Image: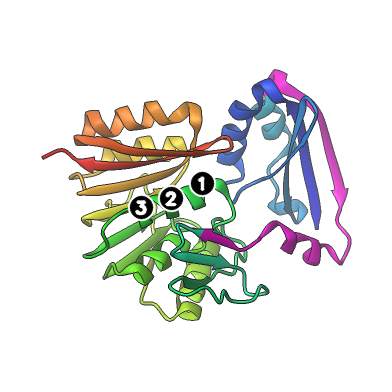
Amino acid sequence: MIRLALRVRRADSEVVLAQLLELAPNGVEETEDGDVVEYAVYGAPGELPELPDLRAAAGAALVEVRTETIPDDWVDGWKQFHQPVLVAERLYVRPPWEPATSKAGVHDLVIDPGQAFGTGSHHSTRLCLELLCALEPGGPLADLGCGSGVLGIAAATLGWAPVTAWDHERPAVAAAQENARANGVKLAVTRWDLRSDPIPEAPTLVANLLRPLLLTLAERMPAPPAALVAGGLLRAEADEVAAAFARRQGLRERERREAGDWAALRLERAY
């Protein structure tokens, strides 16, 4: 296993992160060191983004590139990055190696990250879960760009039905299916390309995607849903994405939540 890290100046880190996530959509590890932020991705040599692409993404913000081989016990260290999360006193999202919650009235969700993004521990996923908890559950829901399936599984647990999940990455489809089985919920998972395939329609949509994909979604949706939870945004990108959905689909921002460098939006159809 290889760890490939880019160290960039903090002042430019948000822009660099957005570009890196387009190259490594399963997510990056982020650590801080004074005025420098380090972003790292893991994988076999053939699975990692090309160095020229990474250097181009970082541009003038680049301080250093580091590559190292990870020892055999790396898996145990990797687990430390996936901690249980309590959301809105309603959902307890945990990896399978952590014990279940004993808190009354809280749904226990077991999410094995596998090779898919979105376990609840990342700010963008947690913000989407918080906004989902703020909606009145019921009726069909579609999770676009489902990753590990955590948002769709949470929705099914909270009371939406039927729930469908859609993702372009094969590991995400497999992870979402397995996680749905582990949690005993019905989740129809489909491999799907947002840029070319028909956009699923449902009264409620959740889309924890990157900015370019959210802008594509705003352009391609055949009709606005009653409610849309949109995540995967840097704070500086939220206004642009909210404006795109308002202009193209008539969706109005009802709530915005932020944590760290990230933001998520709850948009609703204007009646």
The amino acid sitting under disc 1 is Ser
Task: Give left or right: position of 251 versus 102.
Answer: left
Q: CA distance from mark 3 to mark 2?
A: 8 Å
In the image, residue 51 lies in the stretch drawn in magenta: no
Q: Secondary structure at mark 2?
A: helix
Q: x and y percent of residue 38 in the render? A: 75, 36
Residue displayed at 70% across by 56% down: 81
Count of numbered marks: 3
Mark linked to residue 206? 3
Q: Is residue 53 above or below residue 93?
A: above
> Most extreme residue toward the top, as rendered?
60
Determine contact: label 1, label 2, CB under 8 Å: yes
Indicate which disc residue 180 carries. none
Q: Secondary structure at mark 3?
A: strand
Q: From the viewer's perspective, tell me whether residue 219 is left or right of residue 94.
A: left
* Residue 186 x/y as whole percent: 36, 77
Q: Earlier in the sequence, mark 3 or mark 2?
A: 2
Can residue 251 be seen? yes
The magenta span reads 59-86
Find disc 2 in the rendering and name its residue.
Answer: 128
| Residue type for callout 2 | Cys
Where residue 246 sits, quadrant-wise, is top left
Which mark is drawn over residue 124? Answer: 1
Residue at the image position 65 percent from the left and 61 percent from the top: 83
Secondary structure under tag 1 reads: helix
Q: Position of residue 199 (x, y in %)?
A: 28, 51
Which residue sits at x=62%, y=69%?
95
Q: Is residue 14 left or right of residue 234?
A: right
Q: Quadrant of residue 138?
A: bottom left
**164 vs 230, nearest the viewer:** 230
